[in-house]
Amino acid sequence: MTDLRTAEGVLRLLREHGGRLTTSRRLLVEALFAGGDHKTAEELAAAVQVRAPDVHLSTIYRNLDELERLGVLVHSHLGHGPASYHLAAEAHGHLVCERCGGTIEVGEEIFGTLVRAARTRHGFVVDTRHFAISGMCAACAAAGGGIPAP
Amino acid sequence: MTDLRTAEGVLRLLREHGGRLTTSRRLLVEALFAGGDHKTAEELAAAVQVRAPDVHLSTIYRNLDELERLGVLVHSHLGHGPASYHLAAEAHGHLVCERCGGTIEVGEEIFGTLVRAARTRHGFVVDTRHFAISGMCAACAAAGGGIPAP
DNA sequence: AATGCTGCTGCAGTCTGGTCGCATTAGCGT
DNA sequence: ACGCTAATGCGACCAGACTGCAGCAGCATT
């Protein structure tokens, strides 16, 4: 099996599925592996455009879709704004503060009984990664309850 | 305290806060109390427009915002589409199938350990109503795993 | 190295869901 | 019945995302 934990592995997978190694794809995959996570499509586009200025945003979206179909990455909705993209190998759940927008990454374990109860009571298989869990972080909760942002 | 479980009570509350009783508001509140839940802004607009055809969608949004500020209703994001509005008195969590879009209403209890673990480990107060829990319903899971819709 | 098939791209346009500014209308206290 | 001003209708606008199309460029082949 192809190693999806390196940029080279991902590009190889792309080729194995009949895809072509274009500049935009190479740079996009590099940007995905370059430090940090929770990157939005716009941020990835900006990173790619540093080296290839006229790669269009729609190309980024098309390549992100393709990489998602291949199982290389997943996208998450962390709140009202744009979606964020993550390498599938390091995907995780999120707690997002409705007030300050801060996100906390959490492992599967925290969902414990929710996942089990959903399955046993409703036959529902929870996807802990696609949508974030919304709420209020410690700092904002301490600063006072209201939802509105600072 | 004003009774938010009847249309009259809500309209009274509106007045108590310096608001005016306009036709669009009256009809909107009636539409909210009329059977069913999970109504989108467009659906509510359509319901209002049956009796007052030139109430504008932006008026619906403004009134929904106002009612939300007053604590009469809450909105939830059930997936990729438009938000849905619920009377605060009967709000609940949701499990939404990524494949067929079906929703299952669930009570607070199902979130059990998630709520507690988020609080003790991260000081994070989970809001179980604002964003739905995403996943796959029994029928779709049985029909085969892929995410794509029918 | 040149050729040609076809997958990929840039572009501009479109779509959805929602918000805003502004002139006008209409609630309602007096 | 009057007048203050909240609320409305309208159109423009916004962000995030997607699509059709003509042309460009990977890469297998010659």
Image (cartoon, coloured by chain):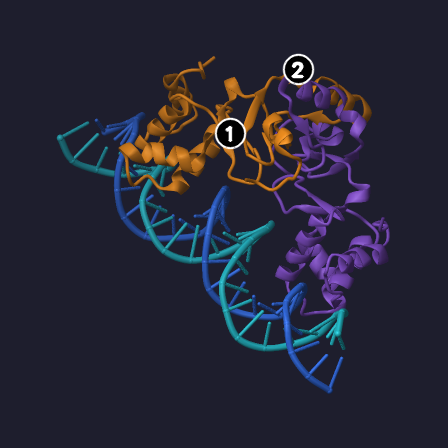
Chain colours: A orange, B purple, C cyan, D blue
Q: Which residue is mark 1?
A: A69
For the residue pair A26 and B124, the one nearer the viewer reads as: B124
Disc 2 packing (10 Å; few <14; some 14–19; many ≥20): few
For the residue pair A10 and B53, the one nearer the viewer reads as: B53
Q: Which amino acid, by three-letter code, is at mark 2?
A: Glu
- Residue A93, position as x, y percentages in the image: 60, 23
First along the sequence among labels 2 and 1: 1
The answer to whether B26 is drawn above or below residue A58 in the figure is: below
Question: Which quadrant of the structure image shows residue B46?
Answer: bottom right
Q: Split into 4 quadrants, where in the image is the C terminus of chain A?
A: top right
Disc 1 packing (10 Å; few <14; some 14–19; many ≥20): few
Q: Which residue is mark 2?
A: A109
- Residue A21, position as x, y percentages in the image: 33, 28
- Residue B69, position as x, y percentages in the image: 69, 49
For the residue pair A35 and A130, the one nearer the viewer reads as: A35
Secondary structure of the residue carrying numbered label 2: helix
Task: State which chain disc 1 sits on.
Answer: A
Residue at the image point whose x is 33% and y is 28% from the top: A27
Task: Identify the disc placed on residue B132.
Answer: none
The answer to whether B100 is drawn above or below residue B30 in the figure is: above
Secondary structure of the residue carrying numbered label 1: helix
- Image position of C14 (left or right of B62): left
- Image position of A106 (left or right of B33): left
Q: Which amino acid, by three-letter code, is at mark 1?
A: Arg
